[in-house]
Image (tube, rainbow, N blue to C red):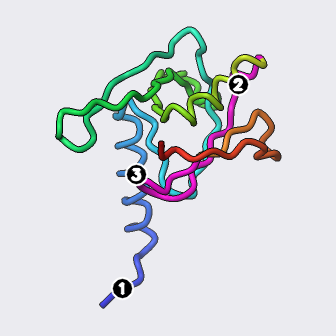
């Protein structure tokens, strides 16, 4: 059985989500979500993660980003696969530090689209390597 949430309940849920996002040091996009981020090309590095708990490390690429609309300019991290990282690097090499990131799908079917033009998702890559 489902019930319709009141406006107060919806506000409470939104406040909780915003609080979690502010406290996290990582940008975590949900499927279908997109965000504009300022990438600092001087603050990026490979990181190694064990996704399956089997000791096998996978290389990911971590970028330091800020929300250009956040007056506090709080630094956060976002990580991508090798292929997704290569696409971000192309835009950074072209001099684009403000990049729109759009996530499509979930799990191994996740894809990201990146663009320096909010109206043009010209680069679409798969994050599953």
Question: Mark 1 or mark 2: which is in front?
Answer: 2
Q: Earlier in the sequence, mark 1 or mark 2?
A: 1
Q: Report the residue at 49% width, 34% height from top.
A: 80
Question: Mark 3 or mark 2: which is in front?
Answer: 2
Q: Secondary structure at mark 1?
A: loop
Residue 31: x and y in percent read 51, 57
Residue at numbered disc 1: 3
Task: Report how many numbered discs are placed on residues in the image.
Answer: 3
Distance (Cα) linking label 3 and label 2: 36 Å
Q: Secondary structure at mark 3?
A: helix
Q: Quadrant of the N terminus?
A: bottom left
Q: Earlier in the sequence, mark 3 or mark 1?
A: 1
Residue at numbered disc 3: 15
Q: Secondary structure at mark 2?
A: helix
Q: Earlier in the sequence, mark 3 or mark 2?
A: 3
Quarter-of-image position of residue 88 = top right
State left or right for residue 26 relative to residue 94: left
Tell me the magenta residue range: 95-111
Q: Report the residue at 50% width, 52% height from top.
A: 110
Residue 48: x and y in percent read 32, 25
Residue 97 colored in magenta in the image: yes
Q: Would you say the residues marked 1 and 2 are in contact, meaning their CB atoms lie under 8 Å apart?
A: no
Q: Is residue 10 above or below residue 16?
A: below
Residue at numbered disc 2: 90
Residue 109: x and y in percent read 49, 57
Q: Report the residue at 74% width, 22% height from top.
A: 96
Q: Report the residue at 35% width, 43% height from top.
A: 20
The foreground one among 79 and 117 is 79
């Amino acid at each position: 059985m489902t019930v319709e949430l009141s406006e107060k309940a919806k506000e409470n849920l939104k406040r909780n989500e915003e609080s979690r996002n502010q406290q996290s040091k990582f940008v975590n996009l949900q499927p279908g979500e997109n965000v504009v981020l300022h990438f600092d090309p001087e603050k990026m590095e490979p990181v190694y993660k064990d996704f399956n708990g089997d000791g096998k490390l996978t290389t990911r690429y971590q970028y330091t980003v800020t929300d250009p609309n956040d007056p506090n300019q709080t630094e956060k991290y976002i990580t991508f696969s090798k292929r997704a990282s290569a696409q971000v690097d192309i835009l950074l090499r072209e001099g684009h530090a403000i990049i729109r990131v759009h996530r499509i799908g979930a799990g191994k079917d996740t894809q990201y689209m990146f663009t320096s033009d909010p109206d043009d998702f010209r680069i679409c890559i798969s994050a599953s390597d």
